[in-house]
Amino acid sequence: MGLPTEKYTTDEYLKNNPTWDIEDSPWKAENVIHMLSAIDKTPESICEIGCGAGGVLVALRRYFQEVDLFGFDIARDVSRFWESHKYAGIDFKLGDFFHLNKRRYDVLLLLDVIEHLQNPFDFIYRLQGFADYFIFHIPLDLSAVSVLREAPLLYVRNKVGHIHYFTKTLALSLLEECNYEIIKWQYTGASINAPNRSIKTKIASIPRHLAYLLNKDWGVRLFGGETLMILAKTGDRK
């Protein structure tokens, strides 16, 4: 058994996820754009760490035509997807962000990243100073039902490599403990709005949606099925 990151530096992740979930990218980009509306100016540079196939940045290019876009990823297999995005004018780099990066950005994106990291505290803390604003997208895998059944947690661990599991409060607390100031957060409505959900999944989500109507936080903690988008800045930024 290798280290968790070996899923991405070998072909293991690609075998389990041949599209690299690029079909979710426009939906994620829409959520990012909504979060950026809370900033009082249009960013001049946006960088995504763990950009994968690059679909989010491509979708953002359609909205931010004059913004400098950058993407970093350690997975060698993603470069095959980047080849098809040359027209978008995105600067993709293969390798460790901390070793390769040479600049500061207006906005840093970490979308579905921290749940994969061996040491998310260290990684997030080290990012301070690399951007004015940060947007995180974090799946809320941890719920009463997922703990009781356990199978959902094992599924995301084996298929997509989640090694840390969060509730809303745990995710927000992680960022605050790493000296980030939360500007805005929102549920994305993933169980309803994310693409490519099967009919079976949608039918199984009916009790979850009913619980959401009664109390969203309570329903998410009980049934799961949500993700969290967070806009933050470092706590010492004036």
Image (cartoon, helix red, strand yellow):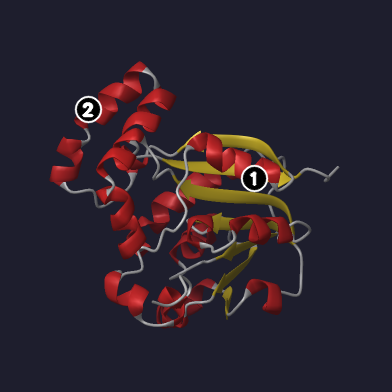
**Quadrant assignment, res 202:** top left
Residue under the image location 67 percent in, 60 percent down:
122
Tell me residue 114's x, y (percent).
53, 56
Q: Give the residue number, with chain letter if any, for mark 1.
A: 175
* Residue shown at 41% from the left, 81% from the top: 77
SS state under label 2: helix
Mark earlier in primary sequence (2, 1):
1
User: Is residue 50 found left or right of 38 in the rendered image?
Assistant: left
Q: Position of residue 56 (x, y in %)?
A: 47, 60
Between 215 and 165, the one nearer to me in the picture = 165
Give the position of the C terminus as an image quadrant: top right
Amino acid type, residue under disc 1 in the picture:
Leu
Give the numbered dot on residue 201.
none
Q: Is 138 or 46 nearer to us in this picture?
A: 138
Quadrant (top left/top right/bottom left/bottom right) for the N terminus = bottom left
The alpha-carbon separation of the residues under discs 2 and 1 comes to 31 Å
Residue 49 lies, in percent from the top left, at: 58, 65
- Name the residue that disc number 2 marks: 207
Residue nearer the viewer, 206 or 80: 206
